[in-house]
Amino acid sequence: MTAASKIDVFISKESIEKRVLELAEMINHDYQNQEIILVCVLNGSFIFCADLIRHIKIPVQVEMVSLSSYEGTESTGQVSFRLDVKQSLVGKNIIIVEDIVDTGLTINFLLQHMKLKNLKSLKLCSLLLKRARLKIPTPVDYLGFDIEDKFVIGYGLDYDGRFRELPYIGVYGA
Ligand code: 5GP
């Protein structure tokens, strides 16, 4: 049996494509005649961010950040930067692009950090949210899918570094 045969499709490739386009259209609408910087939270968001940015029709830049917070399937609750944005973000419209908000600890660490930077605006775009798992109230301005409490993989999301390449979001060993 291959590893892929143990994975159930949870959100299809087609559903993801449709929703990513809808999110990009919301962003295009909200930031008409403005410029934005997408801050892609590595590694899990790289595919989502790459697909999203290709539907953006306004001037856009992309920056990468990397945070460490997870080992295996459980959050350690300890968040730190592996990589921070290099350019000044003062006066800029920032949209953080995240793969999944689970407890919210990771993204709230980043949001607090960003709030100190004298931005013009700050919004959060997340492909997935496990609302029932939130430990900190976390408004998601652009949300792909509100999902139940399952450990998901694919479309950038990994399990111990694997399965990011899957074109759909799946549940491993379900
Ligand atoms: P939080 O700090 O919100 O609990 O966790 C956020 C991070 O945990 C995400 O950016 C992601 O890296 C990881 N994570 C949380 N839930 C899942 C999940 O269901 N699948 C995968 N692959 N990663 C998850």
Image (tube, rainbow, N blue to C red):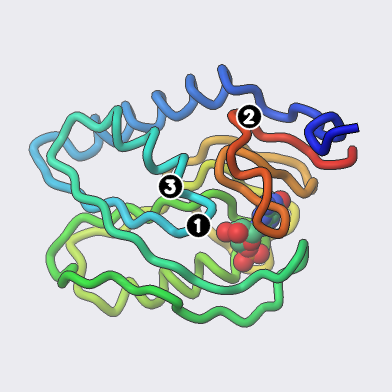
Amino acid type at circle 1 is Asn
Quarter where residue 26 is shown = top left
The outermost residue toward the left is 33
- Badge 1 residue CB within 8 Å of ligand 1: yes
Q: Which residue is mark 3?
A: 125
Q: Which residue is mark 1?
A: 43
Residue 124 versus residue 40: which sits nearer the camera?
A: 40
| CA distance for labels 1 and 3 | 15 Å
Q: Earlier in the sequence, mark 3 or mark 2?
A: 3
Q: Earlier in the sequence, mark 1 or mark 3?
A: 1
Identify which residue is drawn at 24% across, 30% down.
29
Q: Residues within 10 Å of mark 1 (few under 14, many from 20)?
A: some
Q: Residues within 10 Å of mark 3 (few under 14, many from 20)?
A: many
Quarter where residue 145 is shown = top right
Q: Residues within 10 Å of mark 2 (few under 14, many from 20)?
A: many
Which numbered disc, 1 or 3, marks the residue closer to the eye?
A: 1
Rendered position, 154 above or below 97: above
- Does the image show residue 21? yes
Q: Position of residue 50 (x, y in %)?
A: 37, 39
Q: Position of residue 53 (x, y in %)?
A: 30, 37
Q: Which residue is mark 2?
A: 168
Amino acid type at circle 3 is Cys
Q: Position of residue 18 (x, y in %)?
A: 48, 20
